[in-house]
Image: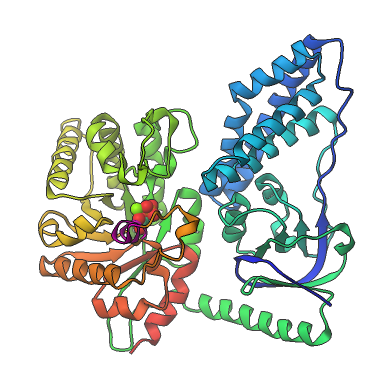
Amino acid sequence: MEIYQGRAVYQGIAIGTVFFYEKGQQAIRAEKTGNPKREWERYEEAKRVAAGELEELYQKALLEVGEQEAQIFAVHEVMLRDEAFDESVKQLIEQAMASAEYAVSVTGGQFVKLFEAMDDEYLRARGADVKDVSDRLLEILSGTRRSIEMGDEPVIVVAKDLTPSETVQMDKKKLLGFVTELGSSTSHTAILARTMNIPALTGIAADASWDGKMAVLDGNTGTLYLEPEESVLLTYRELKRQELQRREQMLSLKGKENVTKTGQRIELYANIAGIGDLPDVLENDAGGIGLFRSEFLYLGREDYPTEEEQFQVYKQALETMAGKKVIIRTLDIGADKKVDYFQMEPEENPALGYRAIRICLERTEVFQTQLRALFRASAFGKLAIMYPMITSVEEVRKIKELSALVQSQLTKEGIATGDVEEGIMIETPAAAIISDLLAKEVDFFSIGTNDLTQYTLAVDRQNPKLEAYYNPHHEAVLRLIGMVVENAHKEGIWAGICGELGADTTLTKTFLEMGVDELSVSPAAILPIREIVRNTE
Ligand code: PEP
Ligand code: MG
């Protein structure tokens, strides 16, 4: 038996045979050819084929893992159209008489290096996406396609690295787990593993000799056992049995109320990034949607989504939820969420900069388009609108003026709207401290603990070096949450939590004691919290 320690990316246990996945090596044709025109045409044709494949992958991912994760293939399509990439390929083909393969291979390598040298962790990880796109072009040009034939039995896939397209091409039913050497926990492959609910580890170097060997993957401790001893196998078979039993037990909580033994009720809603996440919301029996991050509609595209496009998406969410509450947060871009077509100036401190409601209150045409789409959709279900990054009463009053204006315009146009609750996110210390005043202005509060922790503790939530300082259990954060809930109740409005802390089951009891009315969490976290609530005295 050999034991390897890696980093756990997603929890769970997998027991099975290793499938060692090795990427096909593309044969690069002679570096030089005498026919630049022909090579350029081959390159353009390869791009067309690649665009078609990416569209297919996007549709497959949309169905299997949801809109947010499918976006990566839309991003690849955008990369495929990159002018700087084209320019470099063209130069190599025309000036160095290079073959299309050679030009793509050299350009791809240079672009990957550029990304990998970036300071920002997220952008560094995008190097893998650039490589994915240029490998796709090389495969098309050289006629060597990667295939992921995994055989009939389910396997633990082990590889040096997996790109998002490789991950999504694998047959989900045959996947027990992933082990890779490379890849961070923010890589899209890691995000896909989480969404597919498959245990995954990174940081483990393997080779082809592992192929076909028995292994146990422990996604809770980050350990991999290759050719495990009988005693280890027995222990893990028992743990796996308990894991499956637990999931069954969780599913038996579907349809049950979120009520403590003493009769206190709490709403358990779901956080989503788009309508692709709706099947998970229903599967996990969410009471509603507590945070629809609408900015994902604006990301990964080249122009603003139109009023009609947005209306269709919001309407679909409301209709799918069939009368259950759907809280849609208005556009929250800026900070880590950048959208090129907004053409925003670079900032020294983007998290403290021009973001979310600050942009909406300046670019009122963008904000009003979204509000029109939202109020139009409100006729099709139970909509609530939530505004992000609030710091003052004045901001809320300006929002209310714009919202009233949009509603009166729609009425004049004869367009029906429903009753809409309007609330704000409490995610800055300023908003928490003046929550007594803000509570007089709105219908509800939803506490964004991700940003509230960042701003209260002065810790950049994006900076992995500061992880030890980013402590949402800090007394300062917990006191602010308690204060916000108390101030909400004094004015007769409800208060929920939609940041990640809402899913922290070590705090469920504390939140109940504070009187929190709603927790909005990722769909998979709903039933485990329901269980805790129901066992609370
Ligand atoms: C938050 O800040 O807690 C929140 C829910 O919003 P986001 O994570 O999208 O900033
Ligand atoms: Mg936030």
Across and down, in percent, residue 10 comes to 60, 65
Quarter assignment of residue 123? top right
Quadrant position of ligand 1: bottom left
Instruction: Please report the residue visible at 75 percent of the width from the left and 11 percent of the height from the top.
Output: 94
Quarter assignment of residue 28? top right
Query: In front here: 310 or 297?
Result: 297
- Up the image or down, 490 lies above or below 418; here it is below
- Up the image or down, 381 lies above or below 407; here it is below
Instruction: Please report the residue visible at 56 percent of the width from the left and 48 percent of the height from the top.
Output: 69
Q: Is residue 292 left or right of residue 275?
A: left
Quarter assignment of residue 209? bottom right
Query: In front here: 62 or 447?
Result: 447
Across and down, in percent, residue 25 comes to 85, 40
Q: Is residue 451 magenta?
A: yes
Query: In front here: 96 or 18?
Result: 96
Q: What span is in magenta?
A: 450-458
Q: Quadrant of the N terminus?
A: bottom right
Across and down, in percent, residue 501 comes to 38, 67
Q: Is residue 232 left or right of residue 330?
A: right
Q: Is residue 411 magenta?
A: no
Across and down, in percent, residue 325 comes to 31, 58
- Up the image or down, 375 lies above or below 496; here it is above
Q: Quadrant of the C terminus?
A: bottom left
Q: How many marks?
A: 0
Instruction: Please report the residue visible at 86 percent of the width from the left and 68 percent of the height from the top.
Output: 213
State whether the magenta stretch is mostly helix, strand or loop.
helix
Question: Is residue 291 shown to the viewer in this render?
Answer: no
Question: Is residue 473 shown to the viewer in this render?
Answer: yes
Query: In front here: 476 or 425?
Result: 476
